[in-house]
Amino acid sequence: MSTSLTMISMQIARFTLPVIISFGMAGNLLNIIVLTRRRLYNHACSRYFLAAAVNNLLVICLVLVYRFLMNVYQVDLGTYSTISCRIINYITTLTSYISPYLIIAASIDRYCASSINARTRKFSSVRVSQWIIFIIIIAYAVFFINIFFLYDLQPSKGFTCAVKANTVYSSIYVVLQLFLYALAPPFLMVLFGVWTIYNIRRSRLVPVVISRFNRTEQQLARMLIFQVCVHVSLTIPASVFYLLSTLPNVISPTSTYVFVSTIALLLYYCSYSSSFFLYFLSGYIYRQELLELFHKIFRNRVGNRIVPVTNATLHPPRTVVFNQRSAV
């Protein structure tokens, strides 16, 4: 029974990961194209969505492909040398942490944009979003530099790439990772999501002029709330297993544990490839921009296939007909 569950989990990962990678690459590329269109690009929330789409594409192309090779074909590039061990762990950790905090930043932006306080609404701007994205990337890029000092090939563990011997600093680092990965993101997303819904309901009581810009802002808020709900649902199981893995001697890694953790990890990977479908289902403006993009591409392709018709083709020489009649 234990062997069958382990084999089933391997087969599920073998066939599911390529699907997640394929849909994730196509979906995030479409997100980048649609979110850079003029109607969406000039909104602060769209900048967070755009940055998350770029980072999700990096996660899929780098992290998921690496996990696929390691889990399915047992090709672990991180065990080739100490340098590859540290570089791969740095890239995978950094890119995996950035996307959730971009969603948190978008949640804070929607909270500010939906506030009835004019001073609070000023924080929802494109310029502020650019600075917040820059700060998130730089902060985590600097924070995870310690990976180059903590990780190494461990002979006692079969020369796998892991954290060095237990020290005070490594223990603190694990606790910080647990807080930043498993605890803070879902809590902050839900908190600001609930506050945004509360602000939207309050703002309905205040008469405002509904413009095209405001309608787009409302659509972006709906897209974000939908994404937060799905993202939390997909990442909570993996966060629980990550929490269990950091606690010593809590649970033994049985075949059932491995099977359930594999399903939880696949759901977590889906959080990086599901944004396109969430935007398409929840945002009318996103669907409209996407359909206009496809219509424009199709119209250009059809237009390029039309052969120009010359005047000679449209109007054949009439003198030939007159000559034929005169001959008769």
Image (cartoon, grey):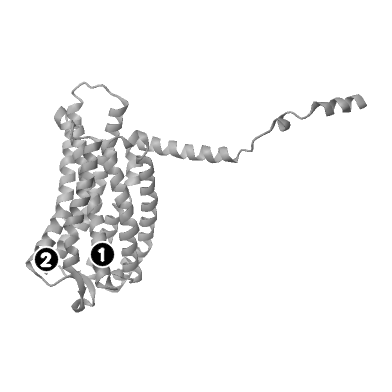
Q: In this view, does 199 lie to the left or right of 44?
A: left
- Please give the residue where the numbered disc 1 appears in the rendered image: 87
Tell which circle, 2 or 1, labels the residue nearer the N-terminal end: 1
* In the depicted structure, whether residue 172 falls above or below residue 119: below
- Label 2 crowd bin: few (<14), some (14–19), many (20+), radius 10 Å: some
Q: Is residue 164 visible?
A: yes
Residue 68 lies in quadrant: bottom left
**Residue 158 horizontal/vertical position (percent):** 23, 77
Residue in the foreground of this view, choosing between 250 and 44: 44
Q: Type of residue at label 2?
A: Ser
Q: Type of residue at label 1?
A: Ile
Q: Is residue 25 left or right of residue 117?
A: right
* In the depicted structure, whether residue 324 falls above or below residue 170: above
Residue at 36% x, 45% y: name it.
32
Q: Do the residues labelled 2 and 1 touch (CB within 8 Å)?
A: no
Give me the C-alpha separation between circle 2 and circle 1: 18 Å
Identify the secondary structure beneath mark 1. Answer: helix
Residue in the foreground of this view, choosing between 124 and 277: 124
**Residue 303 horizontal/vertical position (percent):** 56, 37
**Residue 133 horizontal/vertical position (percent):** 23, 45
Identify the secondary structure beneath mark 2. Answer: helix
**Location of the N terminus (image quadrant):** bottom left
- Please give the residue where the numbered disc 2 appears in the rendered image: 170
Residue at 18% x, 78% y: name it.
156
* In the depicted structure, whether residue 75 falls above or below residue 263: below
- Label 1 crowd bin: few (<14), some (14–19), many (20+), radius 10 Å: some
Which residue appears farthest toward the left when viewing the image? 168
**Residue 284 horizontal/vertical position (percent):** 35, 35
